[in-house]
Image (tube, rainbow, N blue to C red):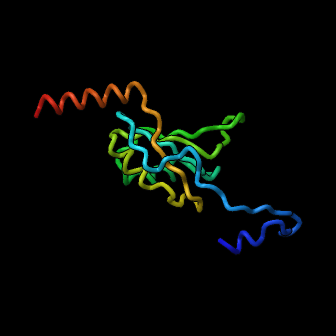
Amino acid sequence: FKNALDLNGKHIGDRWVKIEQGDIMRGWDKKRKRPEGCCSVFIGNLNFDVTEQVIFETFKQCGKIEKIRFGSKANPGSASGFGHVTFQEEDSATKAVKLDGSLVMNRPIRIDYGETSKRDLKKARKKKMVKLNTS
C-alpha cells in the first residue's frame, strides 16, 4: 500500500498519476440490516464484460435466483458496471451480502441490499402471517 502512495505525482509510461489514500466509502453502512421483505441485492464495481452466467455462478450458493439484471449506459447493450440479483427468499439476500468484496473477474465487487419492491414486501408479510397462524 505504501509503495503505491510513493508513486503519487510520478510518470508511469507517458502518463502522470495521482494516487491518494481514499476514505472509507461514504454513505455505505456494511452493518445495515436487511429491509423487511428484501429479496434482492445491488452489485457494483462489475467488470464491463461480466455475463449473467458469471453472476449466477457467483451467487447460486446463496439460494434460488429469480432474476439477474445489469444497469446500462445510454448506449443500449453496453454494461455500466452494476446490477441487481433477485432471489426467491429473503435469507438468500443476507447470504449474498456476506460475499461483499469477493473477486469476480479480478475485481472486488460491492454488494448491498437492494430496494424492497411492493410485491416482495407483500410476499414477506403474507409469509409472516402464515408462520403466525401455524404456530
Relative side of 9 to 82, left or right: right
* Residue 7 image position (x, y, % from top left): 78, 70
Q: Nearer the viewer, residue 58 or 17?
A: 17
Residue 87's place in the image compared with 23, above or below, is above
The residue positioned 68% from the left and 37% from the top of the image is 73
* Residue 46 image position (x, y, % from top left): 59, 51
Residue 124's place in the image compared with 55, above or below, is above
Number of numbered discs visible in the structure rendering = 0
Q: Looking at the rendering, which quadrant does residue 35 occupy?
A: top left
Q: Nearer the viewer, residue 112 or 22?
A: 22
Relative side of 100 to 124, left or right: right
The residue positioned 30% from the left and 31% from the top of the image is 124
Q: Nearer the viewer, residue 43 or 54?
A: 43
Residue 84's place in the image compared with 31, above or below, is above
The residue at the far right in this view is 14
Classify the position of the C terminus by image quarter. top left
* Residue 24 image position (x, y, % from top left): 58, 54
* Residue 99 image position (x, y, % from top left): 44, 55
The residue at the far bottom in this view is 3
Relative side of 28 to 75, left or right: left
Classify the position of the N terminus by image quarter. bottom right
The residue positioned 37% from the left and 51% from the top of the image is 95
